[in-house]
Amino acid sequence: MAEKSTDNWFREDNPNFWPGQSFSLEIEKVVYQKKSKYQDVLVFKSKTYGMCLVLDNCIQCTERDEFSYQEMLAFLPLLSHPNPKKVLIIGGGDGGVLREVVKHPDVEEAVLCEIDQDVIDVSKLYFPEMAKGFDSKKAKVCVQDGFEYLKSHQNEFDVIITDSSDPEGPAEALFQESFYSLMKSALKPNGIICCQAESIWLHLNLIKKMMTFSRELFPSVAYAYASTPTYPSGTIGFLLCSLNKDTKFGIPNSNIRNILSSVNTRYYTSAIHRAAFVLPAFAAKKFYYSILAVLQQQLPILLLLTDRKPIYSFYNNIKSRVYVSKSPKFDRSSEIVSVVVGKRTILPCYIQDVSQFKVIWMKMNNSSILTMDDRAVNGDSRITLLHAYADEWNLQIDDVDEDDAGVYRCVLNNGMYKTLTLQVKIPPQIIDEQSTESYPSPITSGSNFTLKCYANGRPLPKIRILSFDQAENTKIISENNEVILYNVSRHTRKRYECIASNGVPPDVARSFQLTIQYPPEVTTLLTINDNGNNSTQNQLFVDLGQELRIKCQITMYPFGKIFWTKNNIQIDSNQNNYEQYASSYSDNYVIIELYIKQINYKDFGLYSCFARNDLGSNSKTIRLIENPTTTTSTTTVSTTTTVQQTTISSSLLPNFGSERFLYNRESYTDLNKQQRPRKRPKNSTRTSSTSLNVIQQREAENLRVSISSKGKSILKNVLAVY
């Protein structure tokens, strides 16, 4: 973290990344401070280093020393490549690296991919000298996440440069093997990458880790460093990787003089290029295992830098110290190496003072000899002996398969050896023969169903079985290979997924889609009259002459037969007064509709929506009853009085078994003697008395009821009801 203190000093410290120290600059003036979409952006003018750009409280560059970092990050890879025409810069929104890249005469296009537009804008405003590369015709700017950009640009670039911040927060992903693998995929053949790789004084273990996984991806890997005062420890490193195994990073392009004659640099030179790869002993030993190996690698470079005699003297002095003991010595007696199937692996074997002894590699599982001295002898083109340095006898195996797992020995002909165990990790795979298929046979409701998921891999995968509801919400229902679904129904979740994982990417998944068979369910019976009113009762009072729609919602699987009945007789779709419709079809659901165009006497009765399939049948029934209406008129010379009908709720009447009574206040007529009236408008008047119309759904006794005009008489005559 960093802060602007009360005494006008900017202090940068990081207890996690460089504990116990800080770096400070005296502030002359703060000129810009804002939080962008991705980070805090600060620009201030210091008294000694000019304008300073700070992102998330970490100094990115200053006017005084930015060129050392920018030039090295650009020209180390550009002058290690024979013909760098197309270059990608990931990060570097300040424009410094872009400025250097477009200087190179062979570069035809330089793409800068920066996620934060604010950084670009701030640099153009406050660091115009550093940002002038944006004006080059070679430059193209893409404001996008670097990961996403790489995924969509494969085999496209000669050189890729990553100008990243320190590996904390989101930037940590830029220091992982997965990101280097993405960059590799975006390179053309013989392509080179160069990435900011921290300081040997602070991050030795991190750099070694990065070099280790880089060697599995690239045949040529090297580390270089430069001096930049405002970075932690005053130095900054660069990790370079090439797809060309013959790339010698320590020796720049033979055309370097012509190139530098047209390029104005303030830090980078041919000698600086060579010297950048000459590491201090402590770092070289960490990265290359022995001082002698490093000297043997770097001797040609040193001879070019200075007078040969002192260098040879120094080399021989070190060599004599290394060979004080003539007895060979292995770096360690045993080691375990893990690799994912299909990848490249290196079995390390470092031996000091090999001298006159011979080195062979053996696989102990079958006692086969793989190499003798520096030659592969088993005929397997995947196997190579890496012997770049005197004490390096590493065995490289490309495209590792499952059979390569086992015990190996790096053996001297004096009987000494080092044992290495190669563990081959295998991503999980679903075992088809033991697992439920993705679309199993239909399941009958009420039964139990066992969902099975088995997988192999190394190590043995762990299983998780998830269920999904209709909203795609997930729930882990088992961490075993099998789960039993008891008493399944149409409400049982239909979609499941099995995920097998063992720590070796990628995880593997299988989806299951269940089909459940069940008998018909008639869930809704809805009626809609010509006034638009809805009803879901099991009986309905309707007027003569009105139209009516009855809707029925059915779900079943497999789909079977559906039809309407009236009084238990199937309705013919050709009958003039009826129309039948179906809507909202799916493989297990339908809404059917019966439309009665105009209610007449013969339309009263029981209507049933009926469905059946191989598993059963079901229905819903509604009774249509004529709406009772009564009008009483007193005829005079000039007036007609109409008495409105009144229907009394059945709950207010005596209960005669299953019979209920509907009655009118004034007058009654025997239903059997009554003439069926023609259709008339609702609430119309007549000059003669009218009668109560009651629909008889089953035969009943004819009784008579009479009630006085004031409504106080007791039951006298009862006329049928149901």
Image (tube, rainbow, N blue to C red):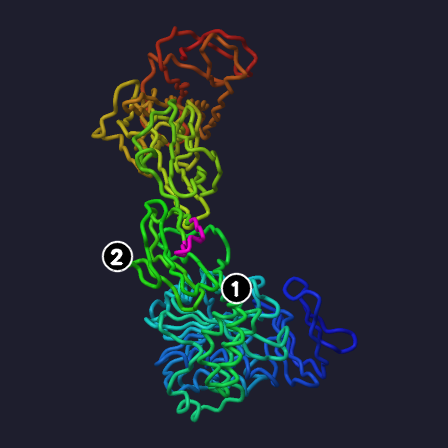
Q: Please, which residue is most extreme toward the left here?
A: 574
Q: Quadrant of the C terminus?
A: top left
For the point 43% across and 77% down, the residue is: 77
Give the distance between the C-alpha atoms of the residues marked 2 and 1, in whole angstroms: 36 Å
Q: Please, which residue is most extreme toward the bottom here?
A: 261
Residue 632 or residue 6, whichever sits in front: 6
* Residue 325: mark in rendering: 1
For the point 47% across and 41% down, the residue is: 474
Q: Could you tell me residue 249's position as x and y percent?
A: 43, 76
Q: Is residue 485 left or right of residue 710?
A: left
When asked about the image quadrant of residue 35, the answer is bottom right
Mark yes or no: residue 469 visible: no
Mark yes or no: residue 218 visible: yes
Q: Amino acid at mark 1?
A: Ser
Q: Could you tell me residue 304's position as x and y percent?
A: 46, 85
Residue 70 or residue 672, whichever sits in front: 70
* Residue 379: mark in rendering: 2
Q: Residues within 10 Å of mark 2 (few under 14, many from 20)?
A: few
When asked about the image quadrant of residue 343, the answer is bottom left
Of mark 2 and mark 1, the one earlier in the sequence is: 1
Q: Secondary structure at mark 1?
A: loop
Residue 26 or residue 672, whichever sits in front: 26
Give, as a single range, the part of the protein colored magenta. 410-421
Q: Secondary structure at mark 2?
A: loop
Residue 529 or residue 248, whichever sits in front: 248
Q: Could you tell me residue 483's position as x and y percent?
A: 43, 30
- Up the image or down, 329 lies above or below 436; here it is below
Q: How would you classify the magenta stretch by its main secondary structure?
A: strand
Residue 413 is inside the magenta segment: yes
Q: Amino acid at mark 2?
A: Gly
Q: Could you tell me residue 559's position as x and y percent?
A: 28, 30
